[in-house]
Image: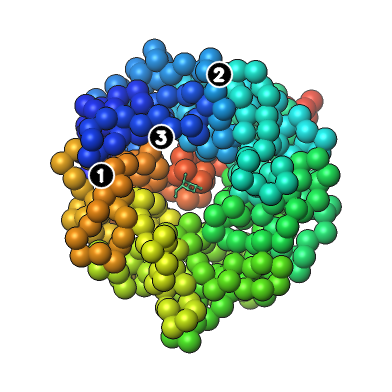
Amino acid sequence: MMKFAWDNYKSFAWGKNELRPLTRNGHIGNMFGGLRGASIVDSLDTLYIMGLMDEYNDAKEWVETSLDLNSNGEASLFEVNIRYVGGLLSAYYLTGEEMFKRKVMVLGEKLLPAFNTPTGIPRGVINLGSGTSWSWGWASAGSSILAEFGTLHLEFVHLSELSNNGIYTEKVMNIRKLLNKIEKPHGLYPNFLSPVSGNWVQHHVSIGGLGDSFYEYLIKSYLMSDKTDEEAKKMYYSALEAIEANLVQKSPGGLTYMAEWRGGILDHKMGHLACFSGGMVVIGADDGAPEKRQHYLDLAAEITHTCHESYSRSATKLGPEAFRFDGGAEATATRLSDRYYILRPEVIESYMYMWRLTHDPKYREWGWEAVEALEQHCRVEAGFSGIRDVYAQTVSHDNMQQSFFLSETLKYLYLLFSDDDLLPLEDWVFNTEAHPLPVVRKNCLQGEGGTHDKATSE
Ligand code: DMJ
């Protein structure tokens, strides 16, 4: 599947950001500020771990000769960070190729002006040429988004490691400091924060879109620090406690789900994006209070089961963008506008983590069901495409092969069917775009003469 997706991207969209598989051309979009080749940078590590070396070498050569970092457009800080910074960092750590390190250092520096705000909370959009930054037009009152400014930590810690320059870590620690200080309604983190006043702009809380990877990066920051970042650990487990107390629900049919919260009122909806949380809860099961270990394993299994139900209750056996638990619905989309599937990884991501941590064969069976569904409904003549309605017997394609399909969906599937010693979870942490980053081991010189910590990829 990876070779097919890649070969078609190469034939019809080489150098563009994504492949449009029906019209056989490339898509550029406006998320990456004029940067090109998102599918190439997102695929480097996947190709490498799959042993597709000719393809990896083509990708590497393109990055070396054609990835132009002197672009001058409006980029999403979050998207550039998770796909480009994450992709280049993991390519460097996996292969040791200095060129990736050089590129990521240049790119990292270009992101720093986004933090020049009264609070140091970055704005969502940055012009990579001029360094001017601003907030998304659609975000309430010029606010920054929790899942955007809260999903920089892993990459920025590694930028500091590699450059021996503490500035990146300082920037993300400052975000954390503010989040720790500010009052949280019921212990929850709302999705919108003003980068000017440092106050929440409105009280919408979600484990899906707008909130999701902030929570993911708390537990992963702790794990990536070789379990030394006690502050991240504390924040993660208290956030999870608040989520359990306010958002986790059981449907009349017995399905556990994470609802959304709007100023105290629950919206009984779970987004596909929120399905990453099965994986998140299971990777954190061992490090919370010992008496909660089994509870976390159960919660992770229940959420993953619910997300599987959202797939198995559709005609295509692929899940909708959002599913509901009200008006008689149980893990199904009720609105036409929520019925699409754009090759997202989150459900398969949770299968992979659940498999690694429990070895229950059902997770491989569920992963295989997803493979068959992808092959049957999303494979078209020139690549893979998202579909508009997972409940329709005859599918309609959206003509887009997202770069995260190559970076995440196919990588997580590959890992689900690989032995545990391929990128072992004790040594690697996956960023939110599935780019593996090594655990930063504390060397024995730590604290002596300010020696910086050393990253190992053993
Ligand atoms: C990816 O870019 C990342 O997983 C992100 O955290 C959420 N959205 C997409 C995949 O669905």
Residue drawn at (23%, 57%) of the image: 395
Assign a secondary structure to mark 3: helix
x and y percentages locating residue 287 in the rendered image: 62, 62
> Marks 2 and 1: in contact by CB < 8 Å?
no
Distance, label 3 to label 2, CA atoms, is 21 Å
Q: Can you name the residue that lies furthest to the top here?
A: 65
Give residue 382's position: percent from left, percent from top.
Answer: 19, 38
Q: Secondary structure beneath disc 1?
A: strand
Whole-number angstrom distance, CA of label 3 to CA of label 1:
16 Å
Crowding near the residue tagged with mark 2, few <14, some 14–19, many ≥20 C-alpha atoms within 10 Å:
some
Point 52% across, 26% down: residue: 33
* Amino acid at circle 1: Phe
Which residue is tagged 3? 42
Q: Is ligand 1 less than 8 Å from the beta carbon at label 1?
A: no
Residue 344 x %, y %: 39, 51
Q: Amino acid at mark 2?
A: Asn
Secondary structure type for disc 2: loop
Q: Position of residue 64 (x, y in %)?
A: 41, 15
Q: Nearer the viewer, mark 1 or mark 2?
A: 2
Tags 3 and 2 touching, CB below 8 Å:
no
Answer with mark 3 or mark 1, whichever residue precedes in sequence: 3
Q: Quadrant of residue 155?
A: top right
Q: Is residue 228 above or below residue 171?
A: below
Which amino acid is tagged 3? Asp
Q: Earlier in the sequence, mark 3 or mark 2?
A: 3
Reading the image, the residue beneath label 1 is 384
Q: Which mark is residue 72?
A: 2
In the image as oriented, which residue stretches furthest toward the left? 381
Residue at 58% across / 61% down in the picture? Answer: 207
Q: Quadrant of the N terminus?
A: top left
